[in-house]
Image: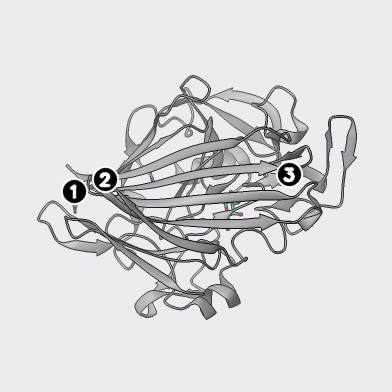
C-alpha cells in the first residue's frame, strides 16, 4: 500500500492511497490564495485499516448506501445474503467493501492533469454479489482545480453496481470551524423518502416547503434539525434526485464557505446525490494533526444511483449485464467567490 500526491500548476494538492482508494488530503486555495486541506481523514494507512468506520475519503462499492434486508430480485433470481452491517440492512458494500480492499494503482498523466488509475477485481460472490466485477476508478487533478473521478466496470454475470466516493468536506479546512454555516445549493426538486432504517421506500417527495429544500442556497445548519425530525435520521442523510436528463453530465450541488470564499461545485452523470451532514461523527475519531472530528464537522455529497434501487422498480436501474460497460463521472470543482 502506498500514498500518491498529485499537484497541479496552481499548487493545489490531492493525496490518496490505493488502500480503499482513499483520498486523504485535498489542499485548496481560499480567496487570498492560502491553501487549506478541506477533507477529513487520517495520516496513515494503518488508521484507515483500523478505524475508518466513517468511510473518510473512500471508494464505496459494490453498492453505495443501503440495500434493504440484504436482498433483492435480479432478473428473476433471488439474491440474498449480502452482509448485514447496518442493523438488518446492507450498507456501503458490506463487511469488506471497496473502501477496505487494496487496489492496483498506476500513475497517469495527460493534457492539463495528473492522476492515478485504480483497478480491482471483485470476485464472484464477494460480499454476496453475483459475478466477477472488474472495476476501475480514475482520479485526476486538473489545472482547473478539479478533482475528477471516472468509474468503469464490467461483469461476467448479471449483477448490480453503484459506486461512489465518501469524501467529507469542510471548506474552512478539515480542522476549521464547523461547516454548518456553509451555504449549500442542490439542483433538485425531489428526494427519495426513507423508512427509519434509511431505506428508500420508493416514494419520491417534493422538497418544496420543507427543510429538504436546497433549490435556493441556504446554510447547511439552518434546517438540519428539522430534517432529522422529518426522517428520524438525525440531520441530513438523504438522496436528492438531481434535476437533469439520464446520463447528462450536470451540476448537482454547490457548497460555499462565506468566510474563506472557497466554493465547491459537484458535477455528475449520476441521477442522485446523498447529502450527508456528518451526523454520526461524535468526537471519537482523532484525525490528521490530532484533530477530533465532532458531530457535523464535515459533510458529504456522494453522487450515486438511488439507495435500495435493486428493490425499487421505478428507480433508475443499477443492473450491470455481461457485455455492458458501466461508466460514470463526477467532478468536484474548486474555486473562490
Ligand atoms: C452515509 C450514509 C449514512 C452513514 C454514513 C457513514 O453515506 O448515508 O447513513 O452510514 O454514510 O457513517
Mark 1 or 3 closer to N-term? 3
Q: Can you tell which mark lies on residue 67?
A: 3
Q: Residue at x 61, y 31 (%)?
A: 192
Quarter of the view holding residue 34:
bottom left
Mark identifier at residue 111:
2
Q: Residue 333, image x and y in percent?
A: 30, 43
Q: Is 219 in front, or is 274?
A: 274
Is residue 234 in view from this perspective?
no
Q: Earlier in the sequence, mark 1 or mark 2?
A: 2
How much space separates mark 3 and mark 2, taking CA atoms? Answer: 39 Å
Looking at this view, name the residue that lies furthest to the top. 245
| Depicted 203 relative to depicted 291: above or below | above
How would you rate the neighbour count of disc 2 (Cα within 10 Å): few for under 14, some for 14-19, many for 20 or more? few
Q: CA distance from mark 1 to mark 2?
A: 28 Å
* Res. 214 image quadrant: top left
Nearer the observer: mark 3 or 2; the answer is: 2
Q: Nearer the viewer, residue 221 or 157?
A: 157
Q: Quadrant of the C terminus?
A: top left
- Ligand 1 contact, mark 2 (Cβ < 8 Å): no
Note whether 123 is above or below 206 in the view shown.
below
Report x, y in % for residue 224.
46, 45
Ligand 1 within 8 Å of disc 3? The answer is no
- The answer to whether the residue labelled 1 contacts the one labelled 2, judged by CB atoms less than 8 Å apart, is no
Disc ID at residue 261: 1
Amino acid at each position: 500500500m502506498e500514498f500518491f500526491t498529485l499537484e497541479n500548476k496552481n499548487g493545489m494538492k490531492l493525496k490518496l492511497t490505493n488502500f480503499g482508494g482513499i483520498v486523504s488530503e485535498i489542499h485548496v486555495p481560499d480567496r487570498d490564495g492560502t491553501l487549506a486541506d478541506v477533507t477529513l481523514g487520517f495520516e496513515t494507512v494503518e488508521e484507515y485499516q483500523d478505524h475508518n468506520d466513517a468511510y473518510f475519503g473512500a471508494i464505496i462499492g459494490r453498492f453505495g448506501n443501503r440495500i434493504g434486508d440484504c436482498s433483492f430480485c435480479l432478473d428473476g433470481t433471488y439474491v440474498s445474503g449480502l452482509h448485514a452491517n447496518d442493523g438488518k440492512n446492507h450498507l456501503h458494500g458490506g463487511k469488506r467493501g471497496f473502501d477496505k480492499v487494496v487496489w492496483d494503482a498506476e500513475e497517469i498523466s495527460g493534457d492539463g492533469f495528473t492522476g492515478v488509475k485504480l483497478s480491482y477485481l471483485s470476485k464472484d460472490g464477494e460480499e454476496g454479489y453475483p459475478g466477477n466485477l472488474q472495476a476501475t476508478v480514475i482520479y485526476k487533478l486538473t489545472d482547473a482545480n478539479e478533482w475528477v473521478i471516472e468509474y468503469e466496470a464490467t461483469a461476467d454475470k448479471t449483477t448490480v453496481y453503484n459506486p461512489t466516493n465518501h469524501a467529507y468536506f469542510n471548506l474552512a479546512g478539515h480542522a476549521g470551524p464547523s461547516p454548518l454555516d456553509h451555504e449549500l445549493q442542490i439542483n433538485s426538486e425531489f428526494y427519495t423518502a426513507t423508512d427509519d432504517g434509511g431505506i428508500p421506500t420508493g416514494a419520491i417527495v417534493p422538497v418544496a416547503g420543507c427543510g429538504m429544500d436546497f433549490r435556493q442556497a441556504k446554510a447547511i445548519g439552518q434546517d438540519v434539525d428539522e430534517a432529522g425530525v422529518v426522517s428520524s435520521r438525525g440531520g441530513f442523510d438523504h438522496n436528492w434526485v438531481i434535476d437533469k436528463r439520464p446520463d447528462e453530465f450536470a451540476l448537482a450541488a454547490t457548497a460555499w464557505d462565506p468566510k474563506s470564499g472557497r466554493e465547491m461545485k459537484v458535477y455528475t452523470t449520476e441521477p442522485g446525490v446523498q447529502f450527508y451532514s456528518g451526523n454520526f461523527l461524535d468526537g471519537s475519531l482523532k484525525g490528521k494533526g490530532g484533530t477530533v472530528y465532532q458531530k457535523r464537522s464535515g459533510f458529504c455529497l456522494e453522487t450515486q444511483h438511488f439507495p435500495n434501487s435493486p428493490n425499487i422498480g421505478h428507480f433508475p436501474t443499477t443492473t450491470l449485464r455481461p457485455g455492458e460497460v458501466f461508466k460514470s463521472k463526477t467532478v468536484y470543482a474548486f474555486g473562490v467567490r
